[in-house]
Image (tube, rainbow, N blue to C red):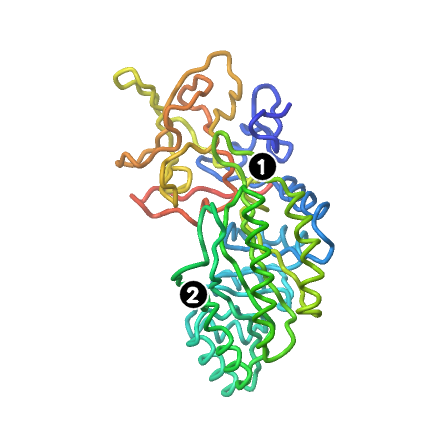
Amino acid sequence: MKHAAQPWFEIADDCLRAGGRALTDLAATAGRTPFYVYDRAVMDRKVEALRRVLPAEIHLHYAIKANPMPEVVRHMLGLVDGLDVASAGELRTALGAGADPADVSFAGPGKTEEELEYAAASDITLNVESEREIEVLAAIAQRTGRKPKVAVRVNPDFELKTSGMKMGGGPKQFGIDAERVPEVLRRIGALPLEFRGFHIFSGSQNLRPEAIIEAQQKTVALAARLAQDAPAPVTLLNIGGGLGIPYFPGEQPLDLEPIAANLRALIPDIRRAMPGAEIVLELGRYLVGESGLYVCRVIDRKISRGQVFLVTDGGLHHHLAASGNFGQVLRKNYPVAIGNRMQGSEREIASVVGPLCTPLDLLGDRVELARADIGDLVVVFQSGAYGFTASPLGFLSHPAPIEIVV
C-alpha cells in the first residue's frame, strides 16, 4: 500500500517500508536511532522520470552538495552524466567514487589556492566565480605547465522567481556579474587557460514551471550574447537546476512536461549560438531529496497544559531543515509520521521535539499522528537532501546519526 502523501514508499502491516524492508527491521540493522536511510530505488525512479521527458541532448549532473554520502554518490554516478562539487572534500568524494574528471565541475565563491591547485591537477572544469580565481589559475598554469579548464559562472541580471533560494540577480557573492563577463572573457583569452563555457544558476527549489521556463529562456539568451565574446568555442553550458520537490501541505510535485517542452524549443537557439556546447542540467535535491527518511525514537511522552509532546532522540542538530531553521521564513512542518504506526488505531495532535535545551528543537508542530508511545519510531520524509551534512551535528555534543543506503 502507498501512503497518500508519500508515493515513494510502501506500507505493510501499518509499518513503513524502504528498500523493501520494514522500518523496524531497518532500525534493528542500524543498531540505534537516530538514523538516515536512503532508498536507491527512489533515486532510480526520479532519474528515469526525468530521462523519459527531457530531450536527449540534455546531460544530467548530480550536485553532490545535496547529499555527499559516498555510497549515494557512487549510486548516482551510475545514473547521471556527471557530477558537480563545491569543495575539495566533495571533489575527493567524486573522484573516489570513480567519476571521470572530464565530467566533473567545481563551483563555489570562496575557492582557496589549495583547492584551485587540486582541481587543476585533477583536470576537472572549474567554474570561476571571480577575477581573482582566474589570476590564481593562470599562475598555477605558468608554474606547472598545466592548462586548467575553466567555465565562467555568471551572476545573471535576472533571478528565478519564487525560488526557495535565489542564486542570481542583483548583488551576489556567486559568479561574475553578467556586465563584467565580456571583459573577463577577453582576459581569459590572454592567459594559459582552456575556456569551456558558462555556468548560469539563478535559483533553487522551485515548484512553478512557468518561473523555471522563464529563467531557462533568459539563461540561454544571456549565454548566446556572452558567447559572442568567448575566447574559444563554447563546449559547456550549465543552465543550473531549480527543480523543486514538495515539502509542505498544499504543495504539488513539479510538472515536468512544460519544462521539457521549453528545453526542446530552446535547443535550436543553443545550437545556433553554441553549436558544440554540451547542455547540462545540474540537480541535487530533485534527484535525492525524496529518497531519504530521517528516523528517530520517542524517548518520552509529555502533556503540558493539554498539548502532547513526543520527545525524541533526534532533532535540529541532525536535521536542521526539518526544524525550520535552514532558510524558512515562516516555519512549516515537513511531512512527519509514526513509522511503525502509519495509520494507527488512534490519532492525535502532537508536537515532535528533540532532546536539546532550545525551543527551536522542533521537528513537528501540532501535527496529526497516530498515537505514539515510548519506543515508537518517528519518520521525517523528504530527508534525502540537505539533512545530515547541513546540520549542526556537534551542537550540545549528542551522538551523530547513522546513515544507511538500501
Q: Secondary structure at mark 2?
A: loop
Q: Mark 1–mark 2 contact, CB under 8 Å?
A: no
Residue 376 placement, left or right of 354: right
Q: Residue at x 58, y 69 (%)?
A: 225
Tell me what residue is drawn at x 44 percent, y 35 percent.
33
Quarter of the image with the N terminus is top right
Q: Earlier in the sequence, mark 1 or mark 2?
A: 2
Name the residue: 34% across, 42% down.
398
Q: Secondary structure at mark 1?
A: loop
Classed neighbour count for the residue bearing mark 2: other residues with Cα under 10 Å, few (<14), some (14–19), many (≥20): some
The crowd level at tag 1 (other Cα within 10 Å; few <14, some 14-19, many 20+) is: few
The reply to whether residue 71 is in sight is no
Residue at 41% in and 24% down:
367
Q: In this rendering, is residue 116 above or below 399?
A: below
Residue 156, image x, y percentages = 49, 62
Residue annotated with mark 1: 253
Labels 1, 2: front one: 1
Percent position of residue 57, x then y: 72, 58
Query: Which of the 4 image quadrants contains residue 305?
Result: top left
Percent from the top left, x then y, of residue 255?
62, 40
Q: Which residue is mark 2?
A: 109
297 up-or-down from 124: above or below: above
**Between residues 35 and 174, which one lies in front from this camera angle?**
174
